[in-house]
Amino acid sequence: MNGITRFNPLGSELTRLDPLWDIDDMFNKFMMRPFSLSRERVEIEPQIRMDVKEADGKYLVNAEIPGVNKDDIHVTVDGNRVSISAEVKQEKETKDGERVIRSERSYGMASRSFTLADEVDQDQVQAKYNNGVLELTLPKKPGSMRKEISIS
């Protein structure tokens, strides 16, 4: 009965029981967030979430950067290294008459860098920003294709 796992409707996949995993996860979450007595979720820093795909000799990147002005987004390509950074300014304020009940402000830089397998043709890069999603088309540089080496 050691190899049997139970279905957990709240979990995303079946896994073996690891009694220390929950403790490590709880410790990491506690250390990453400031101590708070409220039940509201506090986001520490803005994040850029992305998908990277490869098709037809180019890389396609979709990066979620909601609530950012396109002029505050910077993309740099250096060979096969791509960097995306954005200045994030979010303000939410709830008022009751003249007295401020709650004020939430988030300012900071969000950045993400990654390395691709092939060099990018910097002159052919295209970028569009629409509805909080940055779409990058990164064509591969001619002659920089990967070659798999057989081992004897």
Image: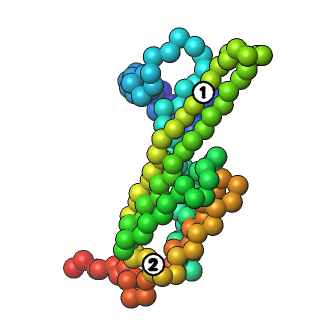
* Point 48% across, 82% down: residue: 123
Nearest the viewer among 61 and 26 is 61
Nearest the viewer among 53 and 85 is 85
Mark 2 in CB contact with mark 1 (< 8 angstroms): no
Colouring chosen for the image of the structure:
rainbow
For the view shown, which residue lies furthest in the front direction?
98
Residue 151 position (above or below residue 38): below
Residue highlighted by disc 2: 122
* Point 44% across, 21% down: residue: 34
Q: Earlier in the sequence, mark 2 or mark 1?
A: 1
Give the quarter of the figure containing the C terminus.
bottom left
Residue 21 position (above or below residue 75): above
Amino acid carrying label 1: it is Glu
Left/right placement of residue 135 relative to residue 47 reads: right
On residue 104, the disc is 1
* Point 37% across, 79% down: residue: 146
